Image (cartoon, rainbow, N blue to C red):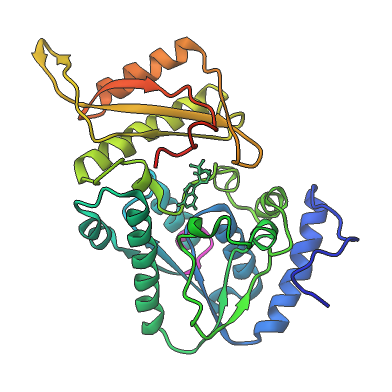
Amino acid sequence: MDTNKRPETMERITTLELANAFIDEQVAAVRAQVGDKKVLLALSGGVDSSVVAALLIKAIGKQLVCVHVNHGLMRKGESEQVIEVFGKELDANLIYVDATDRFLDLLAGVCEPEKKRKIIGGEFIKVFDEESSKLSGISFLAQGTIYPDILESDGVKAHHNVGGLPEDMEMELVEPVKLLYKDEVRVVGEALGLPHAMVYRQPFPGPGLGVRCLGAITRDRLHALREADAILREEFDKNGLAGKVWQYFIAVPDVKSVGVRDGKRYEGWPAIIRAVNTTDAMSATIEEIPYALLHKITDRITHEVEGINRVLYDLTPKPIGTIEWE
Ligand code: XMP
């Protein structure tokens, strides 16, 4: 039997009841596969790895070792949420690695987007490798593979998989959600008690804010981007857009313009808002954000974020623009 093929008889998981049945089944399967051995998981805080972590904690508790690598390119509050939910609430065996300086030092002066992606992906593997070699007695590697990853593993999205792990890691894989579609992973995550915001999180690229701090990343511009992005997310949340818009974020280019603040010349970067709707990320349309809200967001970002003096709204659909700026 091809274990990577979803059986035609498998019902779509849409309810709490179906999710609980799936969880019971997988808990038993994982226990049977793993026995009393240890399992390692790279926990990014994204939907898929978070759901796998919660499922495995339920199945094998402290036999699961989660490693969260903070590459310094996370959105505001994300690493903190991983520590809060997994380290504290679920009492997981969590290793937190703050590798911010390593990543930002390597990225200093690098402008080319694909080079940035390669550096981030390569360094991620290095850090994860280093951490796992400090551990002993690990026999399994858990992964948040989901069904679309299997269906699309024809290379189209290969360059997107930052966080992909080296193939020569000689460990048997544990992939409990590999036959599920994204919507089902979310239902299972809620049934496992994960916070709604974590389970319904919008897609976030593996290289994180690294591809939104355009061109060569600097710490001050990255900080401004993170703060502006947090304001955008907060306002979308408060105004009912968070659940309605597929992906929304800020990009900050490496360009300054002249402005005035407190009667003085004030040079700053523009914050560019991107808010798109799509079903498959292959094409995307632009969300109609009410003007009053755009004014509010502009006002908040220009007053609250050091270094930003203009806010722009990107009206370009995909094609011709991609969703990300680089
Ligand atoms: P584009 O910019 O190609 O993005 O229209 C389509 C979707 O893919 C996400 N994206 C990435 N995801 N690593 C990822 O994991 C990447 O390097 C990457 N680049 C783009 C993007 O956020 C959008 O959802």
Residue at screen point 88% across, 61% down: 8
What is the x, y in percent for residue 95? Answer: 40, 70
- Would you say 155 lies left or right of 212 here? right
The reply to whether residue 266 is visible in this rendering is: yes
* Residue 110 drawn at (x, y percent): 24, 52
Occupied quadrant, residue 288: top right
Q: Position of residue 289 (x, y in %)?
A: 52, 18
At x 66% / y 60%, what residue is drawn? Answer: 146
From this view, report whether residue 200 is shown above or below residue 268: below
Q: Is residue 226 magenta?
A: no
Left or right, 54 with respect to 131, comes to right
Q: In the rendering, at what x and y percent does residue 116 appear?
A: 33, 54
Q: Residue furthest left?
A: 264
Chain part drawn in magenta = 87-93
- Residue shown at the point (80%, 48%) measured from the top left: 15
The image quarter containing residue 76 is: top left
**In the rendered view, does 262 fall on the left or right side of 85?**
left
Residue 70 visible from this viewpoint: no
